[in-house]
Amino acid sequence: MKNWLLLWVSLAIIPVIGFAATPTNVVDLMEGSTVENVSEEEALLVNQTYDYKDSLQRDTPRGTLNGFTRAVYEQDYDTAAEYLDLRYLPDSMSKDKGAQYAKQLQAIIDRNIWIDIEQINDTPEGADGDQLPSYRDLFGRVKLQSDEIALYLQRVPGDNDSIWKISNATVAKVPTLYANLGYGPITEWFIAYLPEGRILKVNIWEWAVILTYLVIAFCVIIPITWLCKLLILRTDYHLKTELAYIVAGPLRFFLAVLVVRTWVSSGTISAAALEVLDTGFLSFISIVWLGWSGMGILQSGLKQRLIDKGQKQGASLLRPLTNFIRVIFVILAILIWLEHLGFNAGTIIAGMGIGGIAVALASKQSIENFIGTITLYSAAPIKVGNLCKFGSIRGTVEEIGLRCTQIRTLDRTLIHVPNAKLVEMEIENISEREKIRFKADIRLDYLMTDTEKLKGIIADIKEMLELHELVMKEPLRVTFKGFGLHGLQVNIFAYIGTKSFPKYQVVSEELHLGIMDIVTKHGSRIIPVAPVALNSSQ
């Protein structure tokens, strides 16, 4: 479904880009001609046009070619036939078929030559110095096998004065030229059964041919890529899911575009439609998509390898690094594509350099965050998966991105902290501790605790700590601190040899319960900081 959506969006954008880049036919050249970047004398010659007296502007070669092109563009082939010299045709041809000859001649021109209307003479006398008779002008040449056929305009008698028409010698060659250089039988079927008209200056039937090519290409490519995807998913390759996505997604689209371009280049659509497709938009999209996905599978493979080697910090760096490379790749692809369209990429880069100053000023915070990211990765005070305390925030680091770091709090909420602020915080990396401190301060009742009981309690607590398998032997202290305001103060200090806080809590519970049992066994009791009223039974 994604492929078809991308296809329709592409088809909607291709013509706009194509026609923005270059004109598509003689009519466009006439209407879009400009006198910029030419000398004053050349501009004067371009702007000079003959004051036509003939109703169809056949007074000059340019007027005739203009009129013929406009008529066929408007699909008025009867009027277009008025620009053909239909006299003295071969016996196999009839002047009654003038409209058909006009249509075939335009197909030959569209498919094989590009006419610059400004190069056609615009005087009744025609061009001088072309080594042709004064009544004949050349307007194009087409290649037929090993031969080259010239297309001529010719001055012929008119109602009041001589006029210019496409010569009868050229018209006589139209059926032969069309049989070899015109549209094939499949295209003829589209022309015959589809309505006349244009969408974005391209014939409706040409759009139909292109869509048909695309549909056929996908019908051919989809089963092949589906089979390849199925075979990949049945393997034991650890990146088979990512590879299957590439085969069924960007690779499928790239192959379909490649097949369509091959068919279209050898097909029978006009040079105008080929010029639209030659913008390379579909190829650009397919290559960028394929390259983007290829970098993704490369990232996944390297990430798994680094994790297997225990380099989790390097693995977490791969994602922002890959995204950065992807952005550079897309920018380079766009510049190459613009060069293909005829734009000067050097000028664009220079403009980007000037505009980069304004962008840098506007994105000051983003640059600071990027520098903060570099600092976090180079100094490595935190890593993905670490439990840390950032100021008043306590949580687990889930991702260190190019702009911010994601922290999952103990309440399971997700906080995004900008990297520029994070590097300035005091960071307590709880996960980096190799052991966890156990500390307990107890107060024993003065009345119930004598010297012998106090010594026994201290000795038993110390023995309990020494015998516990997770309590580290050094440092380990159980000491009588002194006479407190509310009781005899005993300090207990040791380290639990674990990094796991849940395991520490279990051990801490065991030790606290053991301390209570020891105090009770010796006939004493633990009192709170402030005395509390006791029941009479107590």
Image (cartoon, grey):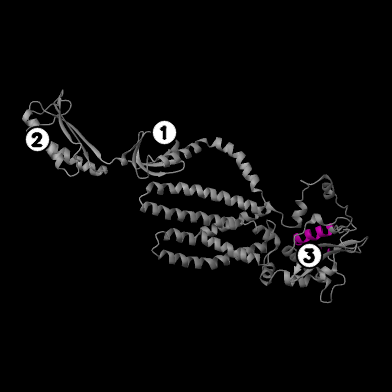
Where 485 sits versus 95, above or below? above
**Which residue lies most toward the top here?**
485
Q: CA distance from mark 3 to mark 1?
A: 74 Å
Helix, strand or loop for disc 1:
loop
- Residues at circles 2 and 3 in contact by the CB criterion of under 8 Å: no
Mark 1, Cα crowd under 10 Å, few <14 / some 14-19 / many 20+, is few
Magenta-colored stretch includes residue 66: yes
Residue 392 spot, x, y in % from top left: 35, 33
Which of the two labelled residues, at mark 1 and mark 2, occupies the earlier sequence position?
A: 1
Q: Which residue is mark 2?
A: 520
Element under label 2?
Answer: helix
Which numbered mark, 3 or 1, is in the foreground of this view? 1
Identify the amino acid type marked 2: Thr
Q: Which residue is mark 1?
A: 424
Residue type beneath disc 1: Glu
Please give the range of residues in magenta.
Answer: 62-83
Magenta residue check for 311:
no
Q: Between marks 1 and 2, how big is the CA–CA gap?
A: 50 Å
Please say if 36 is above or below 86: above
Q: Nearer the viewer, residue 188 or 197?
A: 188
Earlier in the chain: of badge 2 and badge 3, it is 3
Side (left or right) of 219 relative to 234: right
Q: Which residue is mark 3?
A: 141
Q: Name the kind of residue labelled 3 in the image.
A: Arg
Along the viewing direction, whichever of 175 and 330 lies nearer the viewer = 330
Q: Which label sits in the foreground, 1 or 2?
A: 1
Mark 2 residue crowding within 10 angstroms, few (<14) / some (14–19) / many (20+): few
